[in-house]
């Protein structure tokens, strides 16, 4: 077995598994603070993660500013799905899909940025040490202060801390809970969503942008159907747009649902079949989806964090690996970014001798993440259920409640 040579010493070397948004923010934050970090990604190259829907940053923009070098942070507006919108402080609208009237208007949290995932990820990759085709296999503890990561290609690497940023079905999280791996298993939620990205001309998108220039969610209480709409990208002359359309429904009997890997045409037919009673322009938005479009299935699941042994700070998880949640409050990437920032701060404090030990620093990090997500994840789960009726969501529903910033956001240095 070959090894990527990194001697274990008192100097920190952080091994990050997963080159998604959270893993790259961790790497950028560590680099900014002079702490060595290497990222390992199972995809073959930087283009391997070019798919993915846009994401919305709101209260976590503050954390991004603390993590990214000033020159990269200044480039953030260029990653917006529609740079022509400028500074966006708009509301989150919840519409009645039967007539497109406003059910709730969720106040903005100062500012928001709907970013094109591919553009933002390319920005985050700037100047980082990333190794591709490195699929995590397992880790083992080495000596008193080290950790060794083994990849499925037979190679391994040594470092001081392993950070698992490997998503909802994290293999790092699974090993952390061995032999009780059931404690790391996702909890299924009875909601299935189908998503399609389709192109619209300026003329086609005009009535949708009249409702909101960027995004909105809508629901039909009669059929317990939820619709999400958002802009994915816009070309330079604003003549052509890509938009994301998602249609979700409650699951009554999973045996009657479409297989996850079924043909996209069947998923699109299912989306269109749920449009009874839907008003324009939502009806045409979905009913006119081309039959040859690619449709993606999302079977909702979450996981409320359990306490785990970080092995004196040698293994931790962040982002979706430490507490995946539904998308119905739009907070997943914001919590993941705060995870990244607090983790970087903990590692930096240890590097500067401000904590008694690495283990103490990362156990404190783990405690904050666990307590914060123990609140956020059930709220997101309830928001998913409330979005599918029956009836309209009440004013105190998590679906329409204010997305307030956690107190720990304001402890960042």
Image (cartoon, grey):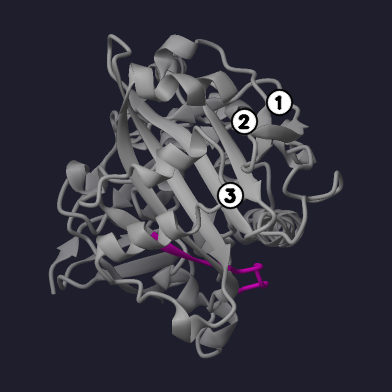
Which disc number belongs to residue 277? 3
Answer yes or no: do the residues labelled 2 and 1 have beta carbons within 8 Å? yes
Callout 3 environment at 10 Å: few (<14), some (14 to 19), or many (20+)? few
Callout 2 environment at 10 Å: few (<14), some (14 to 19), or many (20+)? many
The image quadrant of residue 199 is: top left
Residue 144: x and y in percent read: 48, 70
Residue under circle 1? Answer: 108
Q: Secondary structure at mark 2?
A: loop
Residue 41 in sight here: yes
Label 3 vs 2, first from the N-terminus: 2
Label 2 vs 1, first from the N-terminus: 2
Residue 172: x and y in percent read: 43, 69
Residue 300 colored in magenta in the image:
yes
- Residue bounds of the magenta highlight: 297-309
Marks 2, 1: nearer the viewer: 1
Residue under circle 2? Answer: 58
Residue at the location (29% across, 71% down)?
261
Residue at the location (67% across, 54% down)?
387
Q: Secondary structure at mark 3?
A: loop
The Cα atoms of the two marked residues, 3 and 1, are separated by 30 Å
**Residue 407 in the figure: left or right of residue 284:** right
The Cα atoms of the two marked residues, 2 and 1, are separated by 8 Å
Label 3 vs 1, first from the N-terminus: 1
């Amino acid at each position: 077995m070959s090894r990527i040579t990194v001697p274990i010493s008192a100097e920190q070397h952080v091994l990050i598994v997963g080159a998604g948004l959270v893993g790259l923010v961790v790497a950028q934050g560590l680099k900014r603070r002079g702490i060595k970090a290497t990222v390992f990604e199972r995809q073959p190259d930087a283009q391997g993660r070019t798919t993915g829907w846009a994401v919305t940053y709101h209260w976590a923009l503050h954390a991004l500013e603390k993590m990214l070098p000033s020159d990269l942070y200044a480039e953030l507006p260029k990653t917006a799905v529609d740079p022509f919108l400028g500074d966006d402080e708009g509301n989150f609208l919840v519409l009645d899909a039967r007539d497109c009237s406003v059910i709730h208007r969720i106040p903005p949290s100062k500012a928001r940025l709907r970013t094109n995932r591919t553009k933002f990820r390319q920005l985050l990759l700037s100047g980082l040490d990333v190794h591709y085709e490195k699929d995590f296999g397992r880790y083992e503890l080495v000596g008193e202060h080290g950790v060794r990561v083994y990849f499925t290609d037979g190679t391994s690497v040594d470092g001081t801390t392993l950070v698992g940023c490997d998503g909802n079905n994290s293999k790092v999280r699974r090993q952390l809970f061995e032999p009780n791996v059931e404690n790391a298993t996702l909890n299924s939620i009875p909601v299935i969503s189908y998503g399609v990205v389709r192109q619209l001309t300026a003329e086609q998108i005009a009535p949708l942008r009249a409702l909101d220039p960027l995004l909105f969610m809508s629901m039909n209480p009669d059929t317990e159907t939820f619709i999400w709409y958002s802009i994915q990208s816009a070309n330079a002359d604003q003549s052509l747009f890509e938009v994301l359309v998602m249609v979700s429904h409650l699951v009554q009997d999973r045996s009657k649902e479409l297989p996850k890997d079924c043909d996209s045409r069947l998923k699109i037919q299912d989306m269109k079949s749920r449009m009874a009673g839907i008003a324009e322009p939502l009806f045409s938005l979905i009913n006119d989806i081309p039959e040859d479009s690619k449709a993606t299935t999302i079977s909702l699941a979450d996981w409320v964090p359990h306490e785990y042994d970080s092995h004196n700070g040698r293994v931790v998880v962040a982002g979706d690996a430490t507490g995946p949640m539904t998308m119905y409050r739009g907070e997943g990437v914001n919590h993941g970014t705060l995870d990244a920032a607090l983790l970087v701060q903990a590692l930096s404090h240890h590097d500067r001798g401000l904590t008694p030990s690495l283990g103490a620093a990362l156990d404190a990090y783990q405690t904050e993440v666990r307590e914060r997500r123990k609140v956020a994840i059930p709220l997101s789960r309830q928001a998913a259920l409330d979005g599918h009726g029956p009836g309209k969501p009440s004013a105190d529903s998590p679906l329409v409640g204010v997305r307030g910033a956690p107190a720990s956001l304001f402890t960042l240095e």
